[in-house]
Image (cartoon, helix red, strand yellow):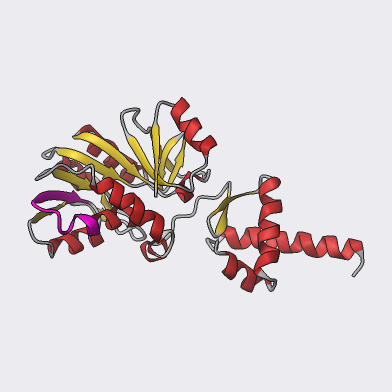
Amino acid sequence: MSGARRRRATEERHEALVTLLRSGIDAVETLAERAGVSPSTVRRDLTRLQREGRIARTYGGALVRDVFHERSFGESARLHAEAKAAIAMAAAELVPAEGSVFLDAGTTCLALARVLADRGPLTVVTRGLETALLLARAPDVRVIIIGGQVQSLSHGVAGALSEVALARLAFDVAFLGADTLDAGKGLGEPTVEETYVKELVAGRSGQVVLLADSSKFVPANAPAWTTIGTSWTVLTDAGVDAETVADFARSGVSVVAVG
């Protein structure tokens, strides 16, 4: 193959990879299968695309920088399970005995729910359907689920009914999730309703802890944003890079890596 043809083939493969990433496919093995090349070739391509600023690398894959992709609950549950478990174990140590806890929707908060299931007596308020079902079977855990419209992908509830319920509740500690995090913009979510629920919860809580694995620190143009409070703590895994931690520190936000 001539040099010109080889370059065209490489450029076409790069465009195909970006298209696949935009559609939400980010695992290296899947990208290799779809592109018809080896995983090592895909990794080299992703490295080059990263250098060009077109994508941001994550563990095991990549994301297109200018595209916000909300994963389904099932898809999220399959990703970064070990990191989420480590974050959950660290978060559980922040729960006071016989305390009142808010658990957000999402798979990292669900991982925390699994740890708390045998640590009652506790009161847990949640907007996550899976979390409510799991803890409903736990001894000595009183479970309250706030009302609202169910979000089809995250299985979390949000909306006016959530606001009504939260106005009557208070929490020792609230554990919030996020779809994306940015030191400048804050916490990004698919809808304004979801960011508003997080703001309401934070205002009713003695302590706010944001649970987010390191893949959530990839820049993305989320549709809705809310500010991360300087009194909040962000718990993440060891995959977060030092520069990102420093960026948040300059914004007054503490990022703690565990595991």
Looking at the rendered image, the quarter that the N terminus falls into is bottom right
Q: Residue furthest right?
A: 2
In the rendered image, is residue 146 in sight? no
* Residue 96 is at least partly visible in this image: yes
Name which residue lies at 52% across and 41% down: 241
Q: Quadrant of residue 180?
A: top left
Q: Which residues are magenta?
A: 113-126
Residue 13 horizontal side relative to residue 227, left or right? right
Image x and y of residue 22, in percent: 57, 57
Quarter of image, res 257: top left
User: In this rendering, is residue 164 above or below 34?
Assistant: above
Q: Residue 10 sits in which quadrant?
A: bottom right
Measured as percent of width and height from the top left, residue 240 is found at 48, 44
Residue 124 locus on image (x, y percent): 15, 50
Give the camera-side residue of 194 and 212.
Answer: 212
Q: Nearer the viewer, residue 218 or 234?
A: 234
The residue at 17%/58% (across/down) is 117
Figure disc tally:
0
The residue shown at (55%, 61%) is 26
Q: Nearer the viewer, residue 232 or 199?
A: 232
Farthest front residue in view: 259
The question of residue 116 being in magenta is answered with: yes
Residue 50 position within the rendered picture, expressed as x and y whole percent measured from the top left? 66, 49
Q: Is residue 131 above or below residue 172?
A: below
Instruction: Locate residue 45 relative to residue 211 in the image: left or right.
Output: right
